[in-house]
Image: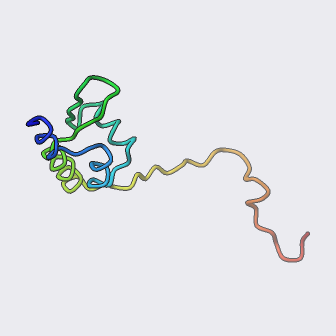
Amino acid sequence: MSGQSQLTSYLTLKQFCQHTRLSVSTVRRRVKDGTIPVLQLGGRRKKLWFAPDALKQVCGESRTQPQQPIVDPIPALPGPSPRWRKKVRPGRN
C-alpha cells in the first residue's frame, strides 16, 4: 500500500503533457534522449511515471531558454524565372 501512495505524487504521461503543454511524442523523445527523468516500473512497455521535480525541470528550461524563430533564407537558384512569376505588362496577352 505504501508504494501506491508514493505514486500518487507522480504524474502519468498524459498528466505530464497537460502540465507542460508538450506533445506526447516530444515527451517520449526527450525521455529517450535522457533530458526528462522518468520512472518506469515493470520494465519496458509499461506506464511512465514522472516525478514532480521533472515537471519543475522542464518548466524551468522553457522559461530560461526562449525559442527563437529559425530564419534560413533560401538562396535564389540560377536560371530564368518561371513564367508564372513574370509580371504581365498591360496590353499584352
The answer to whether 63 is drawn above or below residue 4 in the figure is below
- Quadrant hosting residue 35: top left
Residue nearer the viewer, 19 or 62: 19
Q: Residue furthest top?
A: 43
In the image, residue 52 lies at what x, y percent?
Answer: 14, 47
In the image, residue 59 lies at what x, y percent?
Answer: 20, 53
Q: Is residue 12 left or right of residue 73?
A: left
Q: How is the image coloured?
A: rainbow
Q: Quadrant of the N terminus?
A: top left
In the image, residue 51 lies at what x, y percent?
Answer: 16, 42
Q: Quadrant of the C terminus?
A: bottom right
Q: Residue at x 17, y 52 (%)?
A: 60
Q: Residue furthest front?
A: 1
Residue nearer the viewer, 15 or 1: 1
Q: Residue furthest bottom?
A: 91
Total numbered labels: 0
In the image, residue 56 lies at what x, y percent?
Answer: 15, 50
Residue nearer the viewer, 46 or 76: 46
Q: Residue at x 66, y 44 (%)?
A: 78
Q: Is residue 8 left or right of residue 46?
A: left
Q: Residue furthest left?
A: 2
Residue nearer the viewer, 76 or 67: 67
Q: Is residue 11 left or right of residue 90?
A: left
